[in-house]
């Protein structure tokens, strides 16, 4: 009834007023061959400030789709020259996520159940019989645009959380969580393949003094520099992570103890030469190296040997590599 529709319109207005950012400027592709229908549909949709592009044929729709991304497709079934919107619908339903990413409303004069069912089976999201009522069409359009945007928002949030979970915020390199995961996998692989796997534990020397002398923020800056220096020295197959405070770990697959010690020495020298504090004094690191023995020990036991080597390097005077 008219009252119901007025109420629905009120609701829609309320909804839109509070979710303008969720629906603002949505881009729609209207595939409709009748100029008269084109004008009236466009007027309805543009009243809600949707950006509507209108095409009259399958070919024009295909061309538009290669140029632009659309948040919703409103597709008429019978197009000019006896063409059918079905081929477009099939094209828009190739991947499972198309149902959400390429929502489709079929707009048609047909309203028999068999046809409706066939279209739903093809994966269209909605079906509106012509001539559509403004409010109904807009409600359906809003639902689908909102669904798509919420989905993309959730997906992006999920992606960000996944990255955040494994990244150290300060230095941007993998964090301890990532390290533990990767270490377990590298260790299992080395055990299986019988290939060497070595571990470096890198600890900045007298870092507390840097913080105490120049402040915590300056200490952070040094931490970032050291992380970047180490990152530059390791290969893509090597795995660098921030283990904790001013300690880093590097996993070197297919690298034996002698090579790992050489690599550690290069890292040590590189930092000594290139990382300096405000007064021009070198920032240095001590590095403990251990080749893990996956056949004979657990990862933690191997780690303990690298950590013991690091302790030895500290005791021996710092700024050195110990095996
Ligand atoms: P050593 O040569 O024996 O390793 O001495 P050290 O001072 O480096 O070692 P210690 O473990 O005594 O101190 C580490 C310091 O690192 C203490 C802590 O405040 C600082 N630290 C840990 N995490 C951060 C951080 O994220 N930012 C800054 N600026 N400092 C940190
Ligand atoms: Mg038509
Ligand atoms: Mg310490
Ligand atoms: Mg230290
Ligand atoms: Mg430490």
Image: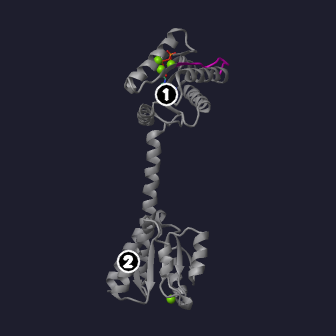
In percent of width and height, residue 65 lies at 57, 72
Residue 158 seen in this snapshot: yes
| Neighbourhood count class around disc 1 (C-alpha, 10 Å): few under 14, some 14–19, many 20 upward | some
The residues tagged by marks 1 and 2 sit, at their Cα atoms, a distance apart of 57 Å
Q: Is residue 182 above or below residue 48?
A: above
Which residue is at the front of the view, 182 or 52?
Answer: 182
In percent of width and height, residue 105 lies at 44, 77
Which residue is at the front of the view, 34 or 24?
Answer: 34
Location of mark 2 (residue): 120
From the Cβ of disc 2, is ligand 2 less than 8 Å away?
A: no
What's the residue at 59%, 24% (across, down)? Answer: 263
Residue 9 seen in this snapshot: no
Q: Which residues are magenta?
A: 278-287
Q: Is residue 169 above or below residue 300?
A: below
Which residue is at the front of the view, 166 or 219?
Answer: 166
Foreground disc of the pair 1, 2: 1
In percent of width and height, residue 184 lies at 41, 34
What's the residue at 37%, 88% (across, down)? Answer: 111
Q: Secondary structure at mark 1?
A: loop
| Neighbourhood count class around disc 2 (C-alpha, 10 Å): few under 14, some 14–19, many 20 upward | some
Q: Do callouts 1 and 2 mark residues in contact (Cβ within 8 Å)?
A: no
Location of mark 1 (residue): 196
Total count of labels: 2
| Residue placed furthest toward the top | 316
Task: Please identify the quadrant where the N terminus is shown.
Answer: bottom left
Q: Secondary structure at mark 2?
A: helix
In percent of width and height, residue 140 lies at 41, 75
What's the residue at 41%, 82% (across, down)? Answer: 128
User: Upstream in the sequence, badge 1 or badge 2?
Assistant: 2
């Amino acid at each position: 009834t008219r009252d119901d529709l007025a109420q629905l319109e009120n609701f829609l207005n309320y909804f839109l007023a509070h979710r303008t950012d969720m629906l603002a400027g949505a881009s729609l592709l209207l595939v409709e061959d009748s100029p008269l229908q084109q004008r009236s549909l466009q007027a309805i949709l543009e009243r809600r400030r949707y950006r509507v592009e209108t095409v009259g044929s399958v070919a024009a729709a295909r061309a538009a789709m290669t140029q632009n991304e659309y948040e919703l497709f409103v597709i008429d079934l019978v197009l000019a020259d006896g063409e059918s919107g079905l081929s477009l619908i099939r094209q828009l339903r190739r991947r499972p996520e198309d149902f959400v990413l390429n929502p489709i409303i079929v707009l048609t004069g047909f309203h028999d159940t068999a046809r409706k069912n066939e279209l739903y089976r093809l994966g269209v999201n909605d079906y509106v019989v012509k001539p559509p009522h403004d409010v109904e069409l807009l409600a359906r359009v809003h639902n689908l645009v909102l669904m798509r945007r919420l989905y993309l928002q959730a997906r992006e949030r999920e992606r960000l959380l996944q990255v955040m979970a494994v990244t150290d915020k300060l230095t941007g390199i993998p964090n301890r969580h990532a390290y533990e995961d990767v270490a377990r996998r590298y260790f299992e692989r080395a055990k299986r393949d019988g290939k060497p796997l070595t571990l470096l534990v890198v600890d900045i020397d007298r870092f507390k003094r840097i913080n105490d002398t120049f402040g915590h923020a300056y200490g952070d800056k040094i931490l970032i520099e050291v992380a970047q220096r180490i990152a530059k020295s390791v290969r893509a197959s090597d795995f660098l992570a921030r283990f904790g405070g001013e300690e880093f770990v590097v996993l070197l697959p297919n690298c034996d103890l002698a090579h790992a010690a050489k690599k550690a020495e290069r890292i040590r020298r590189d930092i000594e030469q290139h990382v300096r504090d405000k007064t021009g004094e070198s920032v240095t690191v001590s590095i403990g190296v251990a080749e893990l023995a996956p056949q004979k020990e657990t990862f933690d036991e191997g780690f303990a040997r690298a950590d013991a080597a690091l302790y030895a390097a500290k005791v021996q005077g710092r700024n050195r590599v110990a095996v």
